[in-house]
């Protein structure tokens, strides 16, 4: 028999709220079973939740995560899933590298403004 987890157990394991898990359920990313009126999650659900959280941490949208999870079910060889992941990872890397360049440029601008302002402030104080 497969190990079953409650919503609270999963929330604790992943340091998220039960509400977050229900949100992913509402989006159709995980589908728990039922034991009476109680939600129960299998190891597969736990794995899917882990992939969802990892995808979010890496900056993927819920739709991108859904595509990835759907391919897992459709392709037993997982080749399609791995190709999609590789493409999405490369796209994300390009985005992050551009953001990194933008941040470096913005920090340089801010440093210049700070130095200029400090110089003007020192000059203004020197004339008092």
Image: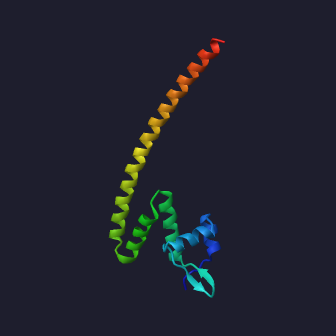
Q: Position of residue 107 (x, y in %)?
A: 49, 35
Which quarter shows the N terminus? bottom right
Disc tally is 0
> In the image, what residue occupies the spot 56% across and 24% down?
117
Q: Position of residue 23 (x, y in %)?
A: 56, 70
In the image, is 7 to the left or to the right of 111? right
User: Is the residue 121 above or below the residue 49 in the image?
Assistant: above
User: Is the residue 10 above or below the residue 128 in the image?
Assistant: below
> In the image, what residue occupies the spot 48% across and 72% down?
29
Q: Position of residue 49 (x, y in %)?
A: 52, 69
> In the image, what residue occupies the spot 63% across and 12% down?
126
> In the image, what residue occupies the spot 36% across and 66% down?
82
Q: Please, which colouring scheme is shown?
A: rainbow
In the image, is 6 to the left or to the right of 52? right
- The quarter of the picture where residue 87 lies is bottom left
Q: Position of residue 47 (x, y in %)?
A: 50, 71
> As drawn, which residue projects farthest toward the top?
127
- The quarter of the picture where residue 8 lies is bottom right
In the image, is 20 to the left or to the right of 92? right
Which quarter shows the C terminus? top right
> As drawn, which residue projects farthest toward the right?
128
């Amino acid at each position: 028999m497969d190990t079953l987890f409650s919503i609270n157990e999963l929330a604790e394991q992943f340091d998220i709220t039960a509400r977050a898990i229900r949100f992913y359920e509402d989006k159709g990313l995980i589908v728990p079973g039922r034991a009476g009126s109680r939600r129960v999650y299998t190891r597969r659900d736990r794995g899917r939740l882990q992939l969802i959280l990892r995808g979010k941490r890496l900056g993927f949208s819920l739709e991108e995560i859904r595509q990835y999870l759907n391919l897992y079910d459709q392709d037993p060889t997982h080749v399609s899933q791995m190709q999609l992941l590789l493409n999405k990872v490369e796209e994300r890397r390009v985005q992050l590298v551009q953001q990194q360049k933008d941040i470096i440029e913005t920090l340089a601008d801010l440093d210049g403004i700070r130095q200029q302002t400090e110089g003007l402030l020192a000059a203004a104080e020197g004339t008092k």
